[in-house]
Amino acid sequence: MKKSIYLLLVAILFVACKNEPKQESIVVDEVKTEDITTSIYPESISKIFDAHGGIDNWNKMQTLAFTIEKPNGNEVTTTNLKTRAELIDTPTYAMGFDGSELWVNEKDGNEYKGNAKFYKGLMMYFYAMPFIVGDDGIIYEDAEPLVFEGKTYQGILISYDAGVGASPDDQYIIYYDTETRQMEWLGYTVTFGKNGKSKDFHFIRYNNWQTIKGLVLPKSMDWYTYENNLPVDKRNTVEFTDVLLSESAPDERWFIMPEGGKAIE
């Protein structure tokens, strides 16, 4: 039944789509979507955007959806890329954010034991790399290169203005192939629920891509163990299926808390 509903939503969206200097820190201020060009970004990140299909092409998209297979069944995430409203639907719970209120709806007596505030937007953020670091209020700086198995990857450190997002102290490093300019690694810190920045970087490898509507997006990601802020061994792989990108916005009613849902304060 849930699969049928998801396929129906995909069909609705498909029909709608048929109708329609280097060391310096650089801050991207608020810019209207239609006015964004790569000229407002430093050259290094602009070339990465270009290698993945272009930030202007990405900014045309309003809906992103994908499925992750989990032990208890499929987890389907649908996001409004402009408002960041989100619905995460699983066999045991649904979690939603309507743009202002976060909620969880437990199914069939199953208790939700996760951290909704932490998980909100998390997998979407990882999936939408590198384009997600084209958001407003981001600071770009050069980072030390990453050397892994004899190959060197150049790095760009991503940090945020104060007050941007739920965890403005988070930092990311995008490491890229100097020949293809495609993103190869992501280093990231976790500061949710903590005060101040962290120096402890975790690592995801991006080396399995797919092209959807001209945009080069992950087909899967590999999480690595790490020591001394360097990746060591592959720990696990997360695959993404049923990926949908649309220039049409999703129905905002999808993100409203249903009867029986619980608001997360």
Image (tube, rainbow, N blue to C red):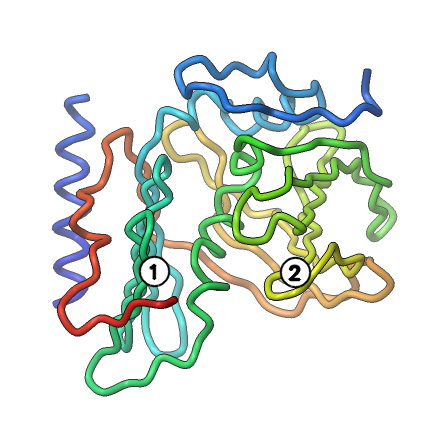
Q: Secondary structure at mark 1?
A: strand
Circles 1 and 2: CB atoms closer than 8 Å: no
Frontmost residue, 244 versus 196: 196
Q: Position of residue 242 (x, y in %)?
A: 31, 51
Q: Quadrant of the N terminus?
A: bottom left
> Residue drawn at (68%, 53%), measured in percent from left and top?
188
> At label 2, which amino acid type do we have?
Val
> Residue drawn at (79%, 36%), measured in percent from left and top?
154
Q: Quadrant of the C terminus?
A: bottom left
Q: Which residue is mark 1?
A: 102
Q: Which residue is mark 2?
A: 190
Q: Is residue 96 left or right of residue 26?
A: left
Q: Secondary structure at mark 2?
A: loop
> Residue drawn at (32%, 41%), measured in percent from left and top?
80
Eyeballing the image, is 137 above or below 32? below
> Residue drawn at (17%, 74%), measured in percent from left and top?
260
Q: Position of residue 213 (x, y in %)?
A: 36, 29
Q: Which disc is residue 47 wearing?
A: none
Q: Looking at the image, tell me whether mark 1 or mark 2 is earlier in sequence order.
A: 1
Eyeballing the image, is 14 above or below 254? above
Q: Residues within 10 Å of mark 1 (few under 14, many from 20)?
A: many
Frontmost residue, 152 versus 139: 139
Q: Is residue 152 left or right of residue 41?
A: right
Frontmost residue, 88 versus 84: 84
Q: Residues within 10 Å of mark 2 (few under 14, many from 20)?
A: some
> At label 1, which amino acid type do we have?
Leu
